[in-house]
Amino acid sequence: MKMKKNPLLEDRSVLYKAAYYVGPYLLIAAFLLLWNSVASTGKTMLPTPYAALRRLVTIWMGDVAKHPMIYHVWISMRRVLSALVFSVVVGVPFGIAMGWNKTFRAIFKPLFEVIRPVPPIAWVPLFTLWFGTGEFSRVAIITMGVFMPIVINSYSGVIMVPEINFQVGKVFGARSTDMLFDVVLPSSLNAIFAGIRTALGGGWMVLLASEMLGAREGIGFLIMQGSSANDLTLAIVGMVMIGVFGALFAYGFDYLERWLCPWKRK
Amino acid sequence: MEKDYAQIRAEAKSAETKAMRKDAIKFLTISIVVVILVLTAWQLAVSLGLVSTRFFDSPIGVVKTIIDKFTNRKPDGGLLLQHIWASAKVVWLGFLLAAVIGIPLGLFMGWFRLCDRIIRPLFEMVRPIPSLAWIPIVLLFLGIGVKARAVIIFTGCFVATVLNTYTGIRSTNQTLINVAKTCGAGNFKIFWKVGIPSAMPMIFAGLKTSMGSAWGTIVAAEMLASSNGLGYMIQMGRSFGKVSLIMAGIIVIGILGFISSGLVSLVEDFVLKWRPKK
């Protein structure tokens, strides 16, 4: 059986090749061993990796805080998704308009620049004061965190369309609407997707914060619950869950982007 | 009366610049007018009682609260400067720690394939975990002191810094590398003299991003587990129902975040003196 030669490994010593193949697993194993040894001393409340895994398996379908784990995950995802959908539907056109129309930009950009440096979590007390502690204020807070990057990136995407694209459009006789849909949008799609990706990452953070601050379901709540009840295993399971689902979302979104922008496939 | 070609071009160009300047002034005035309108509307809405002061405070009220907070300990037991110092101290500590560890790591991972290959899986596992999720573990090992909060900020800034540094050094212009090779430079020398300087712009972009997220993280962390700092102050404003305190806190945080980014930009301009001004 012929094996394809890895071009990175030509002319390298045996030691190098060994490190190349084994190294990553060694590092992960070392990390797990470190975790395990710290946990096994029993002096801290840290659970061993195996204990955390076992706990995850038991609560996945079972009950924790009155609902199966999968329900908590679903609630958290639903919150992020609603905020995301709203932000994309409202934010992308908004950002494009800001980039396309100079008057629109003059009106709204200053307001944006004022609101932008404020971390989304700082809005939590204000929103809970205005809207109570229900689901709406939570999703609204996540929206604050997600809306900004989307609008800003859409705006940048439109601004950064190379002048030559506009000139080609004019040569082909494009009117204003044509210019917008056929020239600006495809060029800025790249930046728009980058904005959504950034927003995704930040969105999970804001979700976590808003859940930790006053929810009764959701992964953030579980982490807080585990922490305050000295049930660190639960907290760690929650952490891992957030990590896994955040990564899943990111990968899913990458696939979505590659599907929608076929010209980006290398 | 025959103008020659150069003269016509010069006149057209000056007309164009004049038009652009007129446009710029027009849009600037629109922006200023809008800002003034919004502030006035806000102030009037509160003064005329159109919105309950339970939910809103006027711009003047917020400014008054900020000034008052410099000397007034109520209701949360601390002065504004104390809160600012507590928050800013932790933010800069965590940020610098992330820079000191993250930049070299990103550089090595970006340049040396073996490094990348070994560290990458562990990094990808840690990467999606939001910094706030580390709070229980940090709480366990380090309590709620300054060190603990700095570590939480660190986890937030670290990933952004490493990613941007990695991207920066990976996008080094191949031509520059080739020139260095032609001059007989070894791999490490190229890394040091070509790779690192050309990665600097991206590194600073990453630093600015992580500075922004550092402020976000500190506010959340303080709301959850702290007894001083701006996030705590805002939370106290909520507990005591003082909207003015909440708004004042938000505005101060916004200003501080803005100043911090500005400081990073200053350092960037100083370090990257060789960059042509855009």
Image: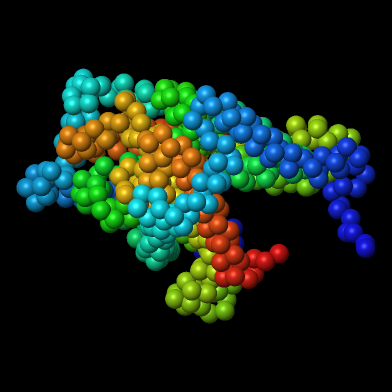
In the picture, the quarter occupied by the C terminus of chain A is bottom right
Taking the view exactly as shown, the residue that stands out farthest to the left is B48
Taking the view exactly as shown, the residue that stands out farthest to the bottom is A173
> In percent of the image, x 79 and y 35: which residue is there?
B190
Q: Is residue A17 left or right of residue B133?
A: right
> In percent of the image, x 35 and y 53: which residue is there?
A66
The percent position of residue B22, horizontal first and vertical second, equals 37, 54
Residue A143 versus residue B69 in the image, above or below: below
The percent position of residue B67, horizontal first and vertical second, equals 21, 26
B240 and B192: which is toward the camera: B240
In the picture, the quarter occupied by the N terminus of chain A is bottom right
Q: Quadrant of residue B275?
A: top right
Task: Determine if residue B95 is in view.
Answer: yes
A74 and A33: which is toward the camera: A33
B4 and B85: which is toward the camera: B85
Residue A53 versus residue A165 in the image, above or below: above
> In percent of the image, x 33 and y 35: which residue is there?
B223
The percent position of residue A81, horizontal first and vertical second, equals 42, 61
Q: Is residue A85 left or right of residue B116?
A: left
Q: Is residue B38 left or right of residue A17?
A: left
A174 and A226: which is toward the camera: A226
The percent position of residue A17, horizontal first and vertical second, equals 86, 43
> In percent of the image, x 37 and y 41: which residue is there?
A225
